[in-house]
Image (spheres, rainbow, N blue to C red):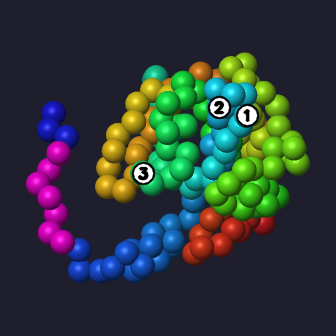
Amino acid sequence: MNTRSPRAPAPTFDTGHFRQALGQFATGVTVITTRLADGSFRGLTASSFNSVSLTPPLVLWSLGTSANSMPIFSGNSHYVINVLAADQAHLAKVFSTRGDYPWDTVPYELSRTGQPILTGACAWFECHNRSRYPEGDHVIFVGEVEHCEFIPRPPLIFHGGQFHSLA
């Protein structure tokens, strides 16, 4: 199967216009978490989450190539994708900033592989870091889900550059 097509013509719009158009697509909000070799944790907010396959159970998310956490997520064997609930916008904001994250104020539990699971998330997916695909200015991570749980709750939604709930 051919997985590459000839390149598209140069776009007739700028990146700001493209970002605004993308913002019209409502997405859920996730925080991807992992444990570092020294035992500390790292997390980041991502709205680029999607299912890939039921058999085997695969999901994907993407991370900018210039992200300071790229070496961490590229090199770790496992991570957890936490789907945030409507009342967790504060967590999305905390994990969207660069720097040290306040794990002493964020409630969490540990997965069977020692990854942090955010308390109150609608769902979480513990993933083996199966593969990575560089595309444009991002890397697409494909995770093989080893365990997942969910609690039916209203989700946090991101649309037009703002957080919303379905209520």
Residue type (three-letter) at the residue carrying disc 2: Leu
Q: Report if residue 8 lies within the magenta region.
A: yes
Residue type (three-letter) at the residue carrying disc 3: Thr
Callout 1: helix, strand or loop? Answer: loop
Check the image and name the residue furthest to the left. 6
Instruction: List x then y, in percent, for residue 120.
Output: 83, 44
Mark-to-mark CA distance, 1 and 3 = 22 Å
65 or 132, which is in the foreground?
65
Task: Look at mark 2 in the image and give the residue it sits on.
Answer: 36
162 or 42, which is in the foreground?
42
User: In the figure, 149 relative to 102: above or below?
Assistant: above
Mark 2 vs 3, N-terminal side? 2
Callout 3: helix, strand or loop? Answer: loop
Task: Look at mark 3 in the image and give the residue it sits on.
Answer: 65
User: In the figure, 16 relative to 146: above or below?
Assistant: below
Quadrant in which residue 162 is drawn: bottom right
Task: Look at mark 1 in the image and give the residue it sits on.
Answer: 40
Mark-to-mark CA distance, 1 and 2 = 5 Å
Q: Is residue 63 visible?
A: yes
Mark-to-mark CA distance, 2 and 3 = 19 Å
**Which residue range is magenta in the image?**
4-10
Q: Is residue 57 left or right of residue 161?
A: left
Quadrant that contains the N terminus: top left
Residue drawn at x 88%, y 48% is 105
Residue type (three-letter) at the residue carrying disc 1: Ser
